[in-house]
Amino acid sequence: MVAGKVRVAMGLQKSPARSAQEMLPKPPLPSPSSGKVPQKSSISRSFGVYFPRSSAQVQPRPPDVTELLRLVEEFRERESLLKTELLEYKLLKESVAIVPVLENEISVKDDELHRVSKRVECL
């Protein structure tokens, strides 16, 4: 029984050998001598109990829901902008960390250029 529910939840079809009627337990037939009224099982309920007609129709959104949807969209846009700003900040921070290294390389190359230019003058 659990496997059948799992298959239905996953969208798998039941095997054609067993139909839905065979799987359901049959309610006992009321005997005319007993004065009991047979109770309806939960399976025999109409779908109207679970899906009222009004839910099938498109209902207009209340103004609060529309406002909330607008706010959610606005916050998503703001989040996207903040993520972009954060990435830019991280790149800038890495660039600032590289500046002293580059300045050091420039000074080394300048010194090398001065030595080479003096050597050229001597030659």
Image: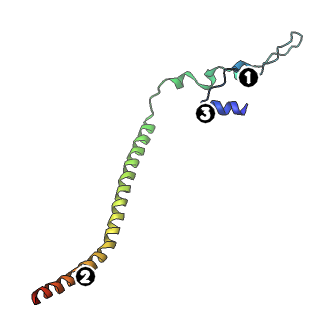
Q: In which quadrant of the rendered image does the N terminus lie?
A: top right
Q: Tag 3: residue type?
A: Met
Q: Tag 1: residue type?
A: Met
Furthest residue toward bottom? 122
Residue 41 lies, in percent from the top left, at 74, 22
Residue 108, disc: 2
Residue for badge 1: 23
Q: Locate residue 101 relative to residue 29 in the image: left or right.
A: left
Q: Locate residue 99 relative to residue 26 in the image: left or right.
A: left
Which residue occupies the foreground of this view, 15 or 41? 15
Q: Is residue 97 above or below residue 43?
A: below
Q: In which quadrant of the rendered image does the C terminus lie?
A: bottom left
The first of marks 1 and 2 along the sequence is 1
Contact (CB < 8 A) between labels 1 and 3? no
Residue 66 lies, in percent from the top left, at 42, 37
Q: Is residue 1 above or below residue 70?
A: above
Q: Tag 2: residue type?
A: Val
Furthest residue toward front? 123
Question: What separation in Å lies between label 2 and label 3 (alpha carbons)?
Answer: 68 Å
Question: What separation in Å lies between label 1 and label 2 (alpha carbons)?
Answer: 86 Å
Which residue occupies the foreground of this view, 94 or 82? 94
Q: Residue at x 39, y 44 (%)?
A: 73
Residue for badge 3: 10
